[in-house]
Image (tube, rainbow, N blue to C red):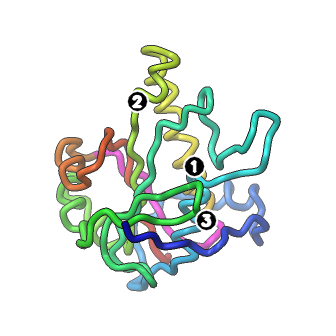
Amino acid sequence: MTRITLPRPETRGRVSVEEAIHERISRRSFQDQSLSLAQAGQLLWSAGGLGAAATAGVTRAAPSAGATYPLELYLAAGRVEGLDAGLYHYDFRAHALEILQRADLRSRLARACLGQKVVAQAPASMVMVALYERTTRRYGERGYRYVYMEAGYVSQNIYLQAEALQLATVAVGAFDDAAVKEILAVEGAPLLLMPVGIR
């Protein structure tokens, strides 16, 4: 399997958390430019990369109930410098991408997202897929709630990181679940797409 190592994530930004929160809005239009590999990597790290060491061990960028981490992160890339168009899985331990499909999926995903053109127009989309059993195995039915809560944490991290990088993004939750799952051809349930681009 082809693995692409991502540039080391920045942990000292030029935008304060307060500024990013204040300026954060959903943005649905993008300039006709590619994302850099560093930008894509920074977004992925903010969503689910390794964090600082804690008393219970290494943490990740977003909290998770019982450290069960039910979300898998994918990048549907169309125009990212240094990447072929395709679907990539984010390996958070190595801060690297593993290519799963070599095809530009953006138009197909846009159709599955009820025709939302923003998904086709963005150079890439972050995709969250839930493996519920990681959390429900420990917490039973209540685990579903925790998975949805985690998707909220992760999406907010992406929003704030995009703001800090002067990128545009929007959370897309309206889609045909079965169609998106068929396009991705991965295990788990698609929960959220976040198209990203230069604003």
x and y percent of residue 184 in the render?
Answer: 26, 54
**Residue 76: which disc?**
none
Q: Which quadrant does the N terminus fall into? A: bottom left
* Of residues 25 and 113, the one drawn nearer to the viewer in this rendering: 113
Residue 42 sits in which quadrant?
A: bottom right
Q: Residues within 10 Å of mark 3 (few under 14, many from 20)?
A: many
Residue 23 sits in which quadrant?
A: bottom right
x and y percent of residue 26 in the render?
Answer: 48, 58
Residue 110 sits in which quadrant?
A: bottom left
Residue under the image location 56 percent in, 73 percent down: 39
Residue 150 located left or right of residue 51: left
Earlier sequence position, callout 2 versus callout 3: 2
Question: In the current view of this chain or complex, which residue is farthest to the front?
Answer: 1
Task: Say which element carries label 2.
Answer: loop
Give the spatial CA distance, label 3 vs label 1. Answer: 11 Å
Q: Do the residues labelled 2 and 3 touch (CB within 8 Å)?
A: no
Give the residue type at disc 2: Tyr
Q: Residues within 10 Å of mark 2 (few under 14, many from 20)?
A: many
* Of residues 105 and 168, the one drawn nearer to the viewer in this rendering: 105
Task: Say which element carries label 1.
Answer: helix
**Residue 132: which disc?**
2
| Residue segment shown in magenta | 162-174
**Is residue 125 visible from the viewing direction of this image?**
no
**Residue 156: which disc?**
1
**Residue 163: which disc?**
3
Earlier sequence position, callout 2 versus callout 1: 2
Give the residue type at disc 1: Gln
* Of residues 20 and 104, the one drawn nearer to the viewer in this rendering: 104
